[in-house]
């Protein structure tokens, strides 16, 4: 149990191992650990960023969806309005057209009737004259006629 | 396996004395405990080889299981050193790692059944073989004295020779008349540090080893007892390594700080 040169041997071995550890073991291990820590920190940070981005994207997607819905609703509204307008316009136009057609029909019928009336009148006149001529031919009384002729002559 | 089982005419005392005897070469102070040095240096080389091979292949990507183990150890030591030692030094952390792992490895030799290696060496012609280097006072004191020199080196490096001398002479009583008193007190405190550091580790491991030997003398009953004591001893192995490392860091950080 006496102290002897083993102590010196152990001290030398100790120094050698410590120097070896300092040169070849500690630096690569600690740099690997620190590099990995940095990597993990970066990864965590980027994951957090990605989560935030995702949240933002979701929010903006929701906004856009709402906007699109509102737009679609307004488009449908406008279309409905336009449809009503077109239908109204068509109705008005149709009514006008109908009125025009009816009016022109009436006018045409009127004109046709007037013409027919005129024709009839002319034909009646011709017939009356013809009838009158026939009656005159048969029942002319020269004496009576002479009266009239004389009267006419007198009037001249 | 107890001595009585071996069939040799050994008493319990002979058995224990045999197991506590070093394989020694040389005479007087200039003798070497070959077994202690063999196991100590062998385990140190194992530590260096293991850690260096992992360090060489260390990847910053996903580490393997062995690399994870090594890195956990390194990070544990690094954290302990950073918590305790506030200066900047490229030496302290590797020194602590070497102390921690090396002492764990040397202490772990305690868990090898007490008779295996001594009997194997006896069979191969070597009379004495002590397997646990940290049960040899030379080994623990060798380390603690190295730490002691580092303490003095750091004290002088950080505070200069005058600062170091002042620390020894002007504390705790800051008056020239008290210089002898201060010197005695401070020297005792200074020298107590490496002595207690080395003796603590030695004492714990020596006592543990002694209890393993006493259990080994119990015949069949040694089996459950060995198991219980070995399980408990795992804690001692790790704890003593940690204490040695921790105190080294504390002493060195004390040397670096101005009072």
Image (tube, coloured by chain):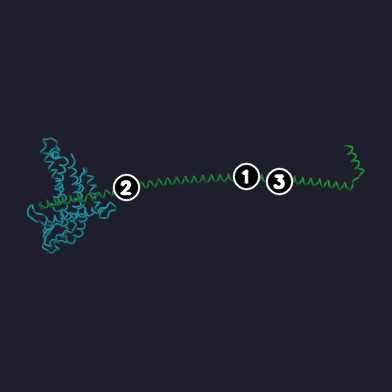
In this rendering, does residue A5 appear at all? yes
* Element at label 2: helix
Residue at 9% x, 56% y: name it.
B25
- The residue at the far left in this view is B27
Q: Colour of chain B?
A: cyan
Residue A42's label in the rendered image is: 2
Residue A82's label in the rendered image is: none
Instruction: Name the residue that disc number 3 marks.
Output: A108
Residue A93's label in the rendered image is: 1
Letter of the chain in green: A
* Element at label 1: helix
* CB within 8 Å, label 2 to label 3: no
- Crowding near the residue tagged with mark 3, few <14, some 14–19, many ≥20 C-alpha atoms within 10 Å: few
Labels 3, 1: front one: 3
Cα separation, mark 3 vs mark 1, equals 22 Å
Residue at 13% x, 53% y: name it.
B136
In this rendering, does residue B243 appear at all? no
């Amino acid at each position: 149990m006496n102290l002897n040169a083993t102590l010196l041997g152990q001290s030398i071995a100790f120094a050698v191992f410590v120097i070896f550890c300092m040169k070849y073991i500690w630096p690569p291990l600690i740099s690997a650990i620190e590099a990995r820590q940095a990597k993990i920190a970066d990864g965590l940070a980027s994951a957090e960023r990605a989560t935030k981005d995702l949240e933002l994207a979701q929010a903006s997607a929701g906004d856009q969806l709402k906007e699109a819905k509102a737009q679609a609703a307004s488009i449908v509204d406008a279309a409905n309005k336009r449809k009503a307008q077109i239908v109204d316009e068509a109705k008005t136009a149709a009514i006008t057209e109908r009125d025009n057609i009816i009016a022109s029909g009436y006018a045409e019928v009127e004109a046709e009737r007037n013409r027919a009336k005129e024709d009839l009148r002319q034909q009646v006149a011709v017939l009356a004259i013809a009838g009158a001529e026939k009656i005159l031919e048969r029942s002319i009384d020269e004496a009576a006629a002479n009266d009239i002729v004389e009267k006419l002559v007198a009037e001249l | 396996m107890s001595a009585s089982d071996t069939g040799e005419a050994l008493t319990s005392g002979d058995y224990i004395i045999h197991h506590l005897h070093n394989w020694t070469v040389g005479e007087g102070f200039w003798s070497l405990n070959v077994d202690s040095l063999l196991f100590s240096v062998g385990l140190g080389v194992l530590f260096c080889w293991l850690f260096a091979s992992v360090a060489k292949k260390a990847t910053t990507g996903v580490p393997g299981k062995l690399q994870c183990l090594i890195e956990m150890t390194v990070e544990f030591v690094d954290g302990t050193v950073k918590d305790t030692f506030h200066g900047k030094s490229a030496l302290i952390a590797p020194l602590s790692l070497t102390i921690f792992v090396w002492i764990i490895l040397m202490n772990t030799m305690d868990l090898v059944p007490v008779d295996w290696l001594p009997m194997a060496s006896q069979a191969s012609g070597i009379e004495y073989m002590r397997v646990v280097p940290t049960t040899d006072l030379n080994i623990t004191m060798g380390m603690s004295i190295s730490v002691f020199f580092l303490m003095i080196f750091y004290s002088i490096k950080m505070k200069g020779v005058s600062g170091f001398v002042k620390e020894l002479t002007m504390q705790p009583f800051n008056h020239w008349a008290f210089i002898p008193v201060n010197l005695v007190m401070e020297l005792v405190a200074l020298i107590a540090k490496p002595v207690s550091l080395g003796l603590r580790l030695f004492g714990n491991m020596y006592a543990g080893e002694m209890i393993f030997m006493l259990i080994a003398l119990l015949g069949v009953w040694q089996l459950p007892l060995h198991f219980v004591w070995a399980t408990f001893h795992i804690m001692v192995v790790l704890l003593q390594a940690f204490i040695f490392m921790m105190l080294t860091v504390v002493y060195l950080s004390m040397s670096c700080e101005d009072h």
